[in-house]
């Protein structure tokens, strides 16, 4: 899985597009390491999680130690060190959503997917997470599937959402 | 896609371009966009700060600090570069107004940032969005690129000798990063642990330079303050609370949504007339007036309550982020208190002990209590613990966790007592919460 220690000049674990984007990012700020957090997030979007290889290459690109990268990365709740599903379903259960049935919604996802908090389905297509407020409280209850919002949901919407994403997963040949 | 709502009582200033395609720069300019910037370049920094001061605009991030005054604290001379920082971390439960601003009117944020930069003598502005707002970041990045292309951003802004650049930034999930000094740490590529104050950001901020940090709604209001004139803007609001506010009605309300209403608008009217009342014709039990950290209010406390910083403060709560959470009579307030403290326990950055341990203890006590294993003494202990966190934490997150907890215990003590000795709660739906 993880390539050998890479020299970013010659080889990268990231796609050429992402590498090019990182070159722009590290030059964008008054201080190079300001690029760290977005880089980790974009790397995760492409690779799926912050693998050792991701951390090594990001550290090298910014010019800080891997320990330093890990120290920062562990602070942020969106960053993960294990793979999630291809589609990570995040159900907000915070107050505004809770009042409009977020727990019923969350339970329905658990029932349909047979997984719990931070679980991943056996085919790797879905993972589920109970999350804090995602900033769509007036259109509650709401979820985020990766970065896409779905709002004003009821438990009955759950099967449709799942099948919609399942067909997306089938449509694109496995590249997760 | 977040639904737009409207009500005849609204005064559309910040929201006036919502739903009109103003994320497109040509549309924005056709609707009068960047005219305020032009005016500010012509009039100069001092004039801008005076207009801001007379507008009575107070920070929409929660604390309500007068914006013009904040800008005037930035030293004129500085060896280090100065910065403008826009806070779009928006993570206070019950709050989603900045979401709509970035979605419908990103250029207003850019224009406001530039005006702030002109006023304090900064050449660079940062717009920081929470990591979950990826699609809004993309909209904002497109808007920034378009502004460069039109010669609005860059070396000679609109042909003048004013230079200004905007850099966008994404967070990666952390409520605490919304705190101003933690935000600066995050933007510098570090953990979001707050800094000691003083020095205040206006003197030593981002990269050690003098920095003005404002909420996205505050910044998006700036071009309107300029186009209306400070005095006219002030006149829309209430005493010492200029302008309008994007109130977010959520929870058990018939017509939830973001409504732009004058500062000082009556809370009862907001819920019953603007929001259409409590959902399903139920009775109102309580209201959280300004995001999850603001102490809960009872129905009798909102009768004559004008929604501005001073009046809500006098009523023993806070206007906060303007997120009004409506709670009906079928709600278990112990569960509500538990869900609230669980959030703060989850988000505590762990830097200082009263907050790290206090939020965790409160969560544990309330979990046990809600599950029916509480004792009479627990009620006092919860209150005692929360009261002892107040004012003893490194940053205001500790207070933000303690304040609502004290409110729930004080105002719903009877309901806590009803939970004692394994009595089933008539309203409880969930015994255990998964978020740890
Ligand atoms: C724990 C915590 C979280 C905060 N989160 C936010 C936030 O998400 N957005 C925001 O604008 N201000 C937030 N604030 C307030 C900021 O520290 C700061 O006061 C504000 O951005 C200043 O802008 P304003 O003067 O325009 O309100 C938070 C404060 C604390 C203590
Ligand atoms: S009060 Fe202390 S532990 Fe809590 S978020 Fe602030 S600094 Fe961190
Ligand atoms: S409480 Fe669920 S999105 Fe804010």
Image (spheres, rainbow, N blue to C red):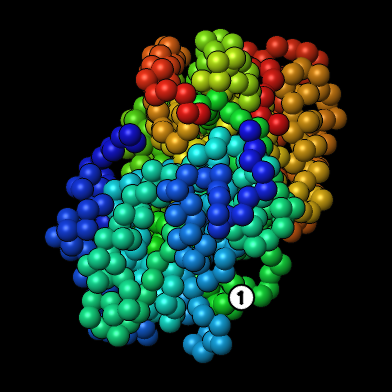
Image x and y of residue B253, in percent:
41, 29
Residue visible at 43% across and 44% down in the picture: B134
- Relative placement, left or right, of B58 versus B141 is right
Residue B412 shows up from this direction: no
Asked where in the image residue B178 lies, by quadrant, the reply is bottom right
Which residue extends farthest bottom?
Answer: B77
Give the SS element for disc 1: helix
Which is more toward the observer, B403 or B24?
B24
Categorize mark 1 by other alpha carbons within 10 Å: few (<14), some (14-19), many (20+). some
Classify A6 as above or below B157: above
Tag 1 subunit: B
Classify A30 as above or below B247: below
- Relative placement, left or right, of B249 versus B17 is right
Which residue extends farthest front?
Answer: A10
Image x and y of residue A155, in percent:
46, 14
Which is more toward the observer, B32 or A48?
A48
């Amino acid at each position: 899985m993880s390539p050998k220690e890479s020299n970013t000049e010659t080889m990268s674990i990231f796609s050429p597009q992402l590498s090019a984007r990182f070159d722009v990012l590290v030059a964008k700020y008054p201080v190079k390491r300001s690029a760290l957090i977005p880089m980790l997030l974009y790397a995760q979007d492409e690779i799926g999680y912050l693998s050792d290889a991701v951390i090594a290459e990001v550290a090298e690109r910014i010019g800080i130690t891997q320990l330093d990268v890990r120290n920062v990365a562990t602070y942020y709740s969106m960053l993960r060190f294990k793979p999630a599903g291809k589609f990570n379903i995040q159900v907000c259960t915070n107050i505004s959503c809770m009042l409009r049935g977020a727990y019923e919604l969350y339970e329905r996802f658990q029932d349909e997917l047979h997984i719990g908090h931070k679980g991943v389905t056996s085919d790797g297509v879905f993972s589920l997470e109970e999350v804090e407020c995602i900033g769509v409280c007036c259109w509650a209850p709401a979820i985020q599937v990766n970065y896409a919002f779905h709002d004003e949901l009821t438990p009955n919407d759950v099967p449709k959402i799942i099948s919609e994403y399942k067909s997306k997963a089938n449509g694109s040949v496995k590249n997760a | 896609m977040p639904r737009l709502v409207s009500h005849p009582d609204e005064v559309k200033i910040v929201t006036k371009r919502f739903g009109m395609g103003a994320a497109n720069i040509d549309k924005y300019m056709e609707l009068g966009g960047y005219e305020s910037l032009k005016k500010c370049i012509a009039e100069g920094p001092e004039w801008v700060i005076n207009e801001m001061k007379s507008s009575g605009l107070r920070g929409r991030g929660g604390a309500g600090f007068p914006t013009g005054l904040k800008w005037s604290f930035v030293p004129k001379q500085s060896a280090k570069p100065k910065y403008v920082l826009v806070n779009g971390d928006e993570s206070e439960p019950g709050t989603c107004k900045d979401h709509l601003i970035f979605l419908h009117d990103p250029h207003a944020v850019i224009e406001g940032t530039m005006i702030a930069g002109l006023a304090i003598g900064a050449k660079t502005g940062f717009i920081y969005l929470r990591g979950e707002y990826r699609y809004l970041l993309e909209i904002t990045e497109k808007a920034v690129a378009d502004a460069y292309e039109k010669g609005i951003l860059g070396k000679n802004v609109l042909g003048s000798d004013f230079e200004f650049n905007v850099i966008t930034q994404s967070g990666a999930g952390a409520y605490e990063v919304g705190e101003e000094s933690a935000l600066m740490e995050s933007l510098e590529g570090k953990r979001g642990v707050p800094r000691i104050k003083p020095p205040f950001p206006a003197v030593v901020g981002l990269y050690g330079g003098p920095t003005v940090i404002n909420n996205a709604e505050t910044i998006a209001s700036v071009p309107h303050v300029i186009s209306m004139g400070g005095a006219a803007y002030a006149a829309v609001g209430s005493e010492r609370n200029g302008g309008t506010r994007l109130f977010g009605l959520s929870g058990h309300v018939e017509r939830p949504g973001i409504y732009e209403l004058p500062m000082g608008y009556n809370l009862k009217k907001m819920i019953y007339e603007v929001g259409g009342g409590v959902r399903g014709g139920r009775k109102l039990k309580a209201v959280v007036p300004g995001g999850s950290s603001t102490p809960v209010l009872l129905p009798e406390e909102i009768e004559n309550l004008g929604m501005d910083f001073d009046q809500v403060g006098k009523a023993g709560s806070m206007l906060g982020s303007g997120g009004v959470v409506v709670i009906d009579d079928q709600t278990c307030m112990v569960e509500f208190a538990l869900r609230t403290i669980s959030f703060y326990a989850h988000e505590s950055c762990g830097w200082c002990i009263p907050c790290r341990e206090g939020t965790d203890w409160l969560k544990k006590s309330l979990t046990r209590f809600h599950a029916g294993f509480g004792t009479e003494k627990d009620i006092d202990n919860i209150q005692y613990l929360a009261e002892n966190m107040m004012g003893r934490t490194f940053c205001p997150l500790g207070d933000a966790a303690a304040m609502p907890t004290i409110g729930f215990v004080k105002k719903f003590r009877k309901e806590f007592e009803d939970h004692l000795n394994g009595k089933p709660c008539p309203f409880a739906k969930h015994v255990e919460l998964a978020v740890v």
